[in-house]
Image (cartoon, helix red, strand yellow):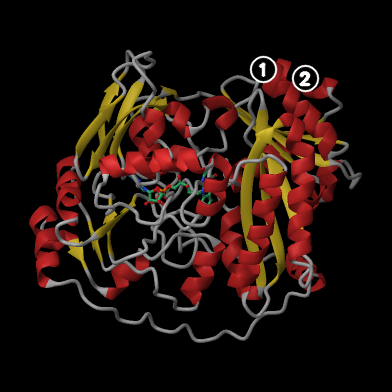
C-alpha cells in the first residue's frame, strides 16, 4: 500500500478523519490517563447551531451569477461543516455548538475565472471571503472577523499539465493529497508530499500555509516543490514562475507561498515532481538518549546522506508511542528514530547512525510507523471524549538552540498546566543543514473550560518559543491563532510591508480578514 492507494477522506465536521475508520483508545492508554487525573465527562447534549441572519437576495444573486445557483449553499448543515478547521480548540468549540465563526454561505467555483469574478465582486456586495482548500487548518485559518462567504475549491480538482521533460506538474488548488498522488502515479510520478493531514488537505492549502510533509528530508517542504503559481486577487490575476530560478527581482512566489489567502486565492500550482520509487525501506533505530539521537540526525542533515524520512522521538514520546517496549531491546529505554528511503536502501546513512551510537532495530518499527502514520490523529477525538486535553504545537530553530528551546517549551507547558499535570511529548521530523523543527504533543486532564485551559498553555509555549529563539510556526502557519506572535517575531516594519502588499492586491480587505495580518 502506497500513498496513491489511500482514499481522500470525506471529512466530517468536528471529528478528524474518515468516519469509516473507528478508533478506540487502547486499554493501556486509558489506564495511563487515570494517572493524569482524566475523568470521562458526562456527555452534554450538543446544542444545535444557532440560526444567523441570511445573506440578502442581492448577495445570493451575485454569488449565483458567478458560479451558478446550484453551487451556492446557504443551508445550515453546509455552513456548519465549513466552520473552522481541526485544531483541538476548533473541535472543542464545535462540540460546544459555538457558531460564532460560521460562514454565511459556501460557494463552489469551478475555474480560475470564476474565482477571479467572485473576488472582483465581493467588495461591492459587502462580502468577505475565506478560501478553503481541504479545510484542515489548525491555526484558526478558516474564520473571518466579519460576515463572510467560504470559497470551497473542491471543484478545481484537475491535473492541468504534466511536463515530463522538465518534470513539473500543474495541479489545481482543490486537488486533495491522495487524488494528486493518484493523478501523478498514473503517469509514473510522485509529488512526495505526505503531511499527516494528507487524507484531507489540498494542493492550494499546502501552498497557502507552507506545509511540510513527513518525507521532507528527501523531497523538501511544499514551498520548495513549488516552481510556479496562479493567484486570483480582487484586482486581477498574478502568474508567477516563468523559469525554475530567476534573478529578475525578488522571488514573488515566496511572497504568495504562506500568505494564507490574505493576498488572493491560489487557483493552481506548478510543482516539481519525481519518478515514483520502485522500492521503499523503513526501519527503526535506537539511541541512548534524545541528545545522542539529536547529534546523529544533525550529522545526517549537515553532512548526509539524508534518507527520505528522518524522525527522532524523545524519551517520553518513545515510551508513550511504543506499546511494546521490547522493540527497544527488552525495555532497556532509550529513544526511537525512524528512517525511510524512497528508492534503494542507503548503507552510508546507516553507517552514520551507527557511528553516532545508534542501534539498528530492523524493519519492524519502521513498518509499524509507516503503516500507522496517518492514524495517530484519529486518537484525538476518542481521547477528548474520555476527558483528556490533547493538542500539538510546533516550532523550528537553529541547531545550537534546539536543546534549550525544547526544555523551555516543555517547562512552559508543564508550568501553565500545573493544575492538570501534563505529559509533553516531542519529536523532530523536519531537518535542515542549519536547524530543525520540534513538534510537541501535550496530554492532560481537561479542566472545566478546556478552551481557556489550552489558550493559557499555548500562550506560555509561544512566549517560551520567542524567548528561546524559535519561530512561531515551522509548518502549521499563522492563521488567527499565531497572528500576534508572528507580528512580534517579524517586527512592525515588516508587518507594515505586508499590509502594503495586502492593500495592493485587496484594497477593500475582503480576503481572509484577521488572518495573517
Ligand atoms: C490531523 C492533522 C495533521 C496535520 N499534519 C500536518 C503536517 O504533517 N504537515 C503540515 O504542514 N500541516 C499539517 N497539518 C495542518 C494542515 O493540514 C496544513 O496547514 C495544510 O497545508 C492545510 O491544507 P488545506 O488544504 O487543508 O488548507 P485549508 O485548511 O483549506 O487552508 C489553510 C489556510 O490557507 C487558506 N487557503 C486555503 N486554500 C487557499 C488557496 N487556494 N489560496 C489561498 N489561500 C488558501 C485558508 O483560508 C486558510 O487560512 C495537519 C492538520 C491536521 C488536522
Image spot of residue 163 (x, y percent): 29, 19
Q: Are marks 1 and 2 in contact (CB under 8 Å)?
A: yes
Residue displayed at 47% across by 58% down: 140
Residue 304: quadrant of the picture:
top right
Q: Nearer the viewer, residue 68 or 382?
A: 68
Residue displayed at 32% across by 17% down: 164
Residue under pointer 2: 352
Note whether residue 501 is visible.
Answer: yes
Return the mark for residue 444: none
Residue displayed at 42% across by 66% down: 13
Return the mark for residue 305: 1
Residue displayed at 87% across by 41% down: 329
Residue 97: quadrant of the picture:
bottom left
Note whether residue 265 is visible.
Answer: no
Is residue 298 placed above or below 402 in the rendered structure? above
Residue 369: quadrant of the picture:
top right
Label 1 sits on a secondary structure element that is loop
Judged left or right of residue 154, residue 337 is: right
Image spot of residue 510 (x, y percent): 27, 54
What whole-number distance in Å separates the C-alpha atoms at marks 1 and 2? 8 Å
Label 2 sits on a secondary structure element that is helix
Image spot of residue 516 (x, y percent): 44, 49
Judged left or right of residue 86, residue 236 is: left
Image spot of residue 2 (x, y percent): 50, 37
Q: Nearer the viewer, residue 482 or 403?
A: 482
Q: How many marks?
A: 2
Judged left or right of residue 397, residue 214 is: left
Q: Which comes before the other along the chain, label 1 or label 2?
A: 1
Is residue 239 placed above or below 11 in the rendered structure? above
Category of crowding for the residue at label 2, using alpha-carbon neighbours closer than 10 angstroms: few (below 14), some (14–19), many (at least 20): some
Category of crowding for the residue at label 1, using alpha-carbon neighbours closer than 10 angstroms: few (below 14), some (14–19), many (at least 20): some
Amino acid at each position: 500500500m502506497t500513498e496513491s492507494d489511500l482514499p481522500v477522506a470525506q471529512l466530517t465536521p468536528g471529528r478528524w478523519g474518515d468516519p469509516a475508520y473507528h478508533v478506540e483508545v487502547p486499554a493501556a492508554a486509558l489506564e495511563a490517563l487515570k494517572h493524569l487525573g482524566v475523568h470521562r465527562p458526562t456527555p452534554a447534549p450538543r446544542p444545535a447551531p444557532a440560526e444567523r441572519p441570511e445573506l440578502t437576495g442581492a448577495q445570493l444573486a451575485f454569488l449565483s451569477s458567478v458560479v451558478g445557483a446550484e453551487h451556492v449553499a446557504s443551508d445550515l448543515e453546509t455552513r456548519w461543516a465549513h466552520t473552522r478547521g481541526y485544531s483541538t480548540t476548533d473541535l472543542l468549540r464545535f462540540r460546544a455548538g459555538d457558531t460564532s465563526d460560521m460562514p454565511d454561505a459556501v460557494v463552489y467555483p469551478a475555474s480560475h475565472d470564476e474565482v477571479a469574478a467572485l473576488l472582483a465582486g465581493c467588495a461591492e456586495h459587502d462580502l468577505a471571503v475565506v478560501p478553503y482548500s481541504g479545510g484542515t487548518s489548525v491555526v484558526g485559518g478558516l474564520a473571518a472577523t466579519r460576515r463572510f462567504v467560504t470559497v470551497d475549491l473542491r471543484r478545481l480538482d484537475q491535473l492541468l499539465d504534466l511536463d515530463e521533460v522538465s518534470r513539473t506538474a500543474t495541479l489545481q488548488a482543490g486537488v486533495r493529497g491522495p487524488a494528486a498522488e493518484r493523478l501523478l502515479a498514473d503517469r509514473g510520478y510522485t509529488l512526495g508530499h505526505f503531511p499527516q493531514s494528507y487524507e484531507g488537505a489540498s494542493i492550494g492549502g499546502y501552498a497557502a500555509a507552507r506545509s511540510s510533509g513527513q518525507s521532507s528530508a528527501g523531497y523538501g517542504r511544499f514551498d520548495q516543490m513549488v516552481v510556479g503559481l496562479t493567484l486570483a486577487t480582487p484586482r486581477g490575476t498574478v502568474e508567477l514562475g516563468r523559469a525554475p530560478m530567476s534573478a529578475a527581482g525578488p522571488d514573488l512566489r515566496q511572497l504568495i507561498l504562506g500568505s494564507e489567502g490574505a493576498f488572493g486565492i491560489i487557483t493552481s500550482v506548478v510543482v516539481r515532481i519525481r519518478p515514483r520509487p520502485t522500492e521503499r525501506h523503513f526501519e527503526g533505530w535506537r539511541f541512548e538518549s534524545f541528545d545522542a539521537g539529536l547529534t546523529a540526525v544533525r550529522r545526517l542533515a549537515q553532512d548526509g546522506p539524508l534518507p527520505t524520512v528522518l524522525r527522532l522521538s524523545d524519551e517520553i514520546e518513545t515510551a508513550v508511542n511504543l506499546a511494546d517496549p521490547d522493540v527497544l531491546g527488552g525495555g532497556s529505554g532509550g529513544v526511537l528514530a525512524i528512517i525511510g528511503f524512497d528508492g534503494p536502501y542507503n548503507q552510508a546513512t546507516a553507517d552514520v547512525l551507527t557511528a553516532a551510537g545508534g542501534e539498528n532495530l530492523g524493519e519492524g518499527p519502521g513498518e509499524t510507523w509507516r503503516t500507522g502514520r496517518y492514524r495517530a490523529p484519529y486518537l484525538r477525538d476518542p481521547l477528548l471524549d474520555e476527558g483528556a486535553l490533547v493538542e500539538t504545537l510546533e516550532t523550528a530553530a537553529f541547531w545550537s538552540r534546539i536543546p534549550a528551546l525544547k526544555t523551555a517549551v516543555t517547562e512552559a507547558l508543564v508550568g501553565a498546566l500545573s493544575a492538570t499535570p501534563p505529559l509533553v511529548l516531542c519529536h523532530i521530523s523536519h531537518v535542515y543543514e542549519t536547524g530543525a523543527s520540534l513538534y510537541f504533543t501535550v496530554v492532560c486532564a481537561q479542566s472545566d473550560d478546556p478552551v481557556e485551559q489550552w489558550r493559557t498553555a499555548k500562550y506560555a509555549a509561544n512566549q517560551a518559543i520567542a524567548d528561546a529563539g524559535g519561530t512561531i510556526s515551522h509548518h502549521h502557519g499563522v492563521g488567527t491563532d499565531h497572528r500576534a506572535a508572528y507580528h512580534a517575531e517579524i517586527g512592525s516594519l515588516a508587518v507594515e510591508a505586508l499590509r502594503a502588499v495586502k492593500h495592493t492586491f485587496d484594497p477593500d480587505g475582503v480576503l481572509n480578514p484577521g488572518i495573517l495580518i
